[in-house]
Image (cartoon, coloured by chain):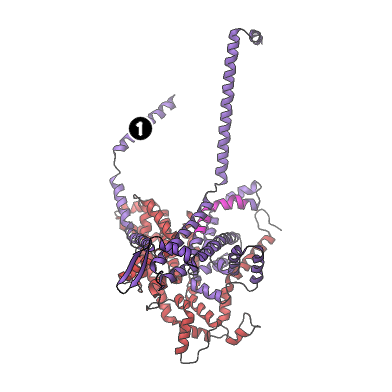
Amino acid sequence: MNMAETTKLTRKEKKALKERMKHLRSGKLEKRYARMGYLFMIPWFIGAGVFLAYPLISSFWYALNNIRITPLGRVFTFVGQGNFTQILIQDPDFLVQLVDYLTSTILSTPIIVVFALLIAMMLNMRIKGKGFFRLIFFLPVIIVSGPILKMLTAEGAGSISAIDVQSLTAAIGSVLPSMLAKPISDVFSNMITTLWYSGVQILIFLSGLQKIDKSMYEAAKIDGGSGWECFWKITLPNLKSMILLNTIYTIVFISSNSQNPIIVLIQNSMFSGTKEKGYGYASAMAWLYSVVVLLLVGLFALLLTTRKDQYEKQVKRNKKLKKKEARNLKRIERRNSRNAKRIEKQRAKGKITTHTTSRSDY
Amino acid sequence: MMGTKDREGFLKQFSVYALLICIGFIYLYPILHMISSSLMTLDDLLDSSIKWLPSSFNLENFRQAAASMDFWRALWQSVVLAGVPTICNLLSCSVIGYGLARFDFPGKKIVMAVIILSFVLPSQITMIPTYVLYSNLGIQNTIWAFVLPALFGQGFNAPIFILIFWQFFRQIPKVLIEASRIDGAGYFKSFYKVALPSAAPAFITVALFSFVWYWNESYLTELYVHGIYGDSSWTTLVIQLDNFSDNYSSYQQTATNAATNLNESINMAGTLLSILPLMILYFVLQRHFVESIDRTGITGE
């Protein structure tokens, strides 16, 4: 009784507090804090306005126009969606390059992420020379840049001569249709440069692995879990957010790398002297490309986040079971009461008197 | 053999080492290939019996590559073009990161969302109007085209740096800042007297990565600073490498002593020269590079 009273009182108090809070405005200090926050953010607001929002909007406006540079300045002629249809229907390169980009990114992103995870797990073991190996695997981050990769692949240093790439690509080509075979063989022939992209990802995974509580593995071992099970049930769920981070980082890195043929195409059409091309045409291309990249990032993010984890699944299943049990219990109760009523009625009619007497005897 | 309860077995350890060494070799293969072939003479290149070790260490390739790339001028300009925007990045991103981490204000979530979106968005989409904007402002083909966006937190890869600072300043205990406020420090004083000195690891990380990324950026440098027609006095080593064959042929015509024709060795020597400064930086500051991501705790999210 006492307990109930106190809870009632606090509830009343809460209500009163809520009423009072309605009339209160946020504190002076809080407001000053918000003002200071804006003050610190001023550089960003200016920058985002001038270097992000303004170019974004005007780029969209450019994409709807045909822009020619004359001695008097830039001449805009509004063409609506003309640039887009021209790119999609008439341009021989863009769509082909876009499909190439899409397939190679979809193929190489998982390769890079899985490879980085493997290396990170090996480096996380108790081995000697850990620092030395980390030094090697992080080295490409420092030196990787478009022109250097271009030079290395041109001189045949991008792939290992010991692996016979030619026969491998031929084998792939005979099994798969050519649309799929080309990007796959491309990935193989540039294996080193693909692997070179995974330096930062390895470090991110490594620091994620070090944050996993060691006692979890111990507990799993006591329960008889093998290393394989530990990987799937402990390591992977704990690294889920890192996997997402690394995937997004990889896609962004591949998309902005100056080896990417599409962005070269955009730059070329920007400075092309022909009548149809130019700034407007290039802007339309950039918009199409950006939408594709955003969609790709969104797709991977969706794939990696919708999967619920094991724990949540168990909790949900448990809840469902409990609900079902409760429902069954209620049903039984209802049936009981119904039966009791029926028996009562029959007894009132005097049909089963013998039964009651026998029970009283009992 | 396969390992006991608390000690890895011999077979397992052996296979891990073997794998690591193999993959490490694959990783280093292009660099080793580059070093060895940059030291070869033309005869060594053509001799199929010579694979790795050249018959004599030939430094002539480096001399010619350096002369054609205008090495010392390009090196100096690379350092300036990567260093000055890096300092601006440090200034702006630390202030912005502190503002995001320490203060609550309406619209903060939107700001975070825009920062993340601007990281994912390819730079090509804003590239053309920005180019027009720079030429209108008259800062195109000058270093200001890199400095100005960096000063306002919109530099190259700035969203990552803002997030690093944000993450770091969030880890500093709030009590520390409050104590300094009670002791009479203003908002700015508590920022640069208390928060900044404790953020040294974040500063090192951001400085290193910003420097490296600005150094390696070729696409935007060529567009904004070098000039697409090469009509600016600014250049970097990476861009010189990008136009290596043109540079070399023009050097060949003007050279007083007979220069050899462009071959693989000279190409590789040029490539090696353009990554050498960063390699030296990396080996000197290796610990800071490799531990950087651990310390900033960017992986906490």
Q: Nearer the viewer, residue B184 or B101?
A: B101
* Vertical relation: B296 (above or below) A358: below
Of residues A1 and A301, which is closer to you in this image?
A301
Residue A242 magenta: yes
The quadrant the C terminus of chain A occupies is top right
Which quarter of the rendering shows the N terminus of chain A?
top left
- Image x and y of residue B29, in percent: 59, 73
Identity of the amino acid at label 1? Lys
Per the rendered image, the range of residues in magenta is A230-248
- Mark 1 belongs to which subunit? A
Does A210 sit above or below residue A325?
below
Q: Colour of chain A?
A: purple
The residue located at (63%, 8%) in the rendering is: A351
Q: Position of residue A211 (x, y in %)?
A: 53, 54
Question: Residue B250, how many percent across, how many down?
Answer: 45, 85
Q: Is residue A360 magenta?
A: no
Residue B266, horizontal then vertical, whole percent: 53, 82
The chain drawn in red is B
**What residue is shown with label 1?**
A15
Res A258 visible: yes
Relative to A66, is A45 above or below?
above
Q: Quadrant of residue B69?
A: bottom left
